[in-house]
């Protein structure tokens, strides 16, 4: 029995008392039948938007062109859509027009997948399932409502969503779905990159995103939005499986690490070389960072996400050794950032896990992590902003002018303090700056 909040039942009662139907539909019903809490509602009703407006004082026409309004009721916002039959999808995204219907069955028949075409009566808890969604939930299958090619032709994003659902729900695709995706893969070019990225983001934080990435590649869908992940097919070094393994091993609760793990070696096929020294991939870290930037920009990810991912990819080849001095460790943290230093250790662990197929103990990374924790507790100056003096001080005390030379002096002071944090004192740094100015910037004067 699905537990329905009393406020939702009261909301539904307004419709029923006025001779209208109201059902909870879509993913909320699917998730409730899978035992998850019912806390996000989409409603379908036999009432037209105008009839809904007559039932409630506060109704917002949020998607009126497609029969959707938002009702403000007892402190909640409920999205309600009139039963409808969709017209043609000329833009491969939304129907050009809709026709209202009084039939719930007709409304459910226009939906994407059977597991999303189940309706729940919020008053009686009756289930309406004309498309066999409960059967597919039990068999853990993602199947389209009707012909798969027809559903994908209407909205090409459904191909990506089908794969995403298999990963996030732990289901399999019905056999006809991958075949239809292969036939329709070119239609994905009509879909905005932002919509694709939203689906990929949801998939990539699932327990095992590799399942989805493999389906994308097997169905030729991957070539439509990240062809870079297919380049190893003609390379003597197949890195795809390693990237997927690393992605699975990265912590799901840190999305930036999942993406960094997926792309950290993507440049290896382009950097492959074989000579007297053997096989090597010189510069693959920089090339992988460049490719990651291009991929994420194409998918319209935020600048913040792009910079965070590419920063980790660019620095993932750090070569820590026990012989590193404390000053060397401080320089590393200053270069990559304190939080990023710990993320890079986690990325390196995921990299090793991706190679071995399981978590691999790493005493050297354990040691580095312990040293980093100690270093951070000491709160040494690691950035220019933490120096005891700034550019204004150098201008007023040394007569330096704003420009490149000022930056050179500040960099010198930063390196001095990284070597010895005790020298981060205003008077000491001014004296160091004077000597540097005299000996390096104005020799012979």
Image (tube, rainbow, N blue to C red):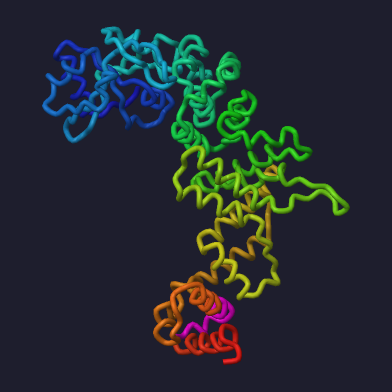
Residue 272 in the image: x percent, y percent? 76, 45
Residue 182 in the image: x percent, y percent? 60, 19
Viewer can see residue 77: yes
Frontmost residue, 242 versus 305 = 305
Question: Based on the displayed image, in which of its 4 quarters is residue 395 positioned?
Answer: bottom left
Residue at (29% x, 19% y) in the render = 66
Magenta span: chief secondary structure:
helix
Q: Is residue 363 left or right of residue 440?
A: right
Quadrant into which the C terminus falls: bottom right
Tell me if residue 232 comes above or below residue 419 in the rendering. Answer: above
Is 423 included in the stretch rendered in magenta?
yes
Question: Based on the displayed image, in which of its 4 quarters is residue 72 positioned?
Answer: top left
Quadrant into which the N terminus falls: top left
Frontmost residue, 397 versus 182 = 397
Viewer can see residue 174: no
Residue at (17% x, 27% y) in the render = 59
Frontmost residue, 126 versus 316 = 316
Is 425 included in the stretch rendered in magenta?
yes
Residue 5 in the image: x percent, y percent? 25, 29
Residue 344 in the image: x percent, y percent? 59, 56
**Magenta segment, which residues?**
415-426
Residue at (35% x, 8% y) in the render = 106
Residue at (29% x, 10% y) in the render = 99
User: How many marks are shown on the rendered structure?
Assistant: 0
Q: Is residue 246 left or right of residue 234?
A: left
Tell me if residue 83 comes above or below residue 427 in the rendering. Answer: above
User: Which residue is at the far front?
Assistant: 445
């Amino acid at each position: 029995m699905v537990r329905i909040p009393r406020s939702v039942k009261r909301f539904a009662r307004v419709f029923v008392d006025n001779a209208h139907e109201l059902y909870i539909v879509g993913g909320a019903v699917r998730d409730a039948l899978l035992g998850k809490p019912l806390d996000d509602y989409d409603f379908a009703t036999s009432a037209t938007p105008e009839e809904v407006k007559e039932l409630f004082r506060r109704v917002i026409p949020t998607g009126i062109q497609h029969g959707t309004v938002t009702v403000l009721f007892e402190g909640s916002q409920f999205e309600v859509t009139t039963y409808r039959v969709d017209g043609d999808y000329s833009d491969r995204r939304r129907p050009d027009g809709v026709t209202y219907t009084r039939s719930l069955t007709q409304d459910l028949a226009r939906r994407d997948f059977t597991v999303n075409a189940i309706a729940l009566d919020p008053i009686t808890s009756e289930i309406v399932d004309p498309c066999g969604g409960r059967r597919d939930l039990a068999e853990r299958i993602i199947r389209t409502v009707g012909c798969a090619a027809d559903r994908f032709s209407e909205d090409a994003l459904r191909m990506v969503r089908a794969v995403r659902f298999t990963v996030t729900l732990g289901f399999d695709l019905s056999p006809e779905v991958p075949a239809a995706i292969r036939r329709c893969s070119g239609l994905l070019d009509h879909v905005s990159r932002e919509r694709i990225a939203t689906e990929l983001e949801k998939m990539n934080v699932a327990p095992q995103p590799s399942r989805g990435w493999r389906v994308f590649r097997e169905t030729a869908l991957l070539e439509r939005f990240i062809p870079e992940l297919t380049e190893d097919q003609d390379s003597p070094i197949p890195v795809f499986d390693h990237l997927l393994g690393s992605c699975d091993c990265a912590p799901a609760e840190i999305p930036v690490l999942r993406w960094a793990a997926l792309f950290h070696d993507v440049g290896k096929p382009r950097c492959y070389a074989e000579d007297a020294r053997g096989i090597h991939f010189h510069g693959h870290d920089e090339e992988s960072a460049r490719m990651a930037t291009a991929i994420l920009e194409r998918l319209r990810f935020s600048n913040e996400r792009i910079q965070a991912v590419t920063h980790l990819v660019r620095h993932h080849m750090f070569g820590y050794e026990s012989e590193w001095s404390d000053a060397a460790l401080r320089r590393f943290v200053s270069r990559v950032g304190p939080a990023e230093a710990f993320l890079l250790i986690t990325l390196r662990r995921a990299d090793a896990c991706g190679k071995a197929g399981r978590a691999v103990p790493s005493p050297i990374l354990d040691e580095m992590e312990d040293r980093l924790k100690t270093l951070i507790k000491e709160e040494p100056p690691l950035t220019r902003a933490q120096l005891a003096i700034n550019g204004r001080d150098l201008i007023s005390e040394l007569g330096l002018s704003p420009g490149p030379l000022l930056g050179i002096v500040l960099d010198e002071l930063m390196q001095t303090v990284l070597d010895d944090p005790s020298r981060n004192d205003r008077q000491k740094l001014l004296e160091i700056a004077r000597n540097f100015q005299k000996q390096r910037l104005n020799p012979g004067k």
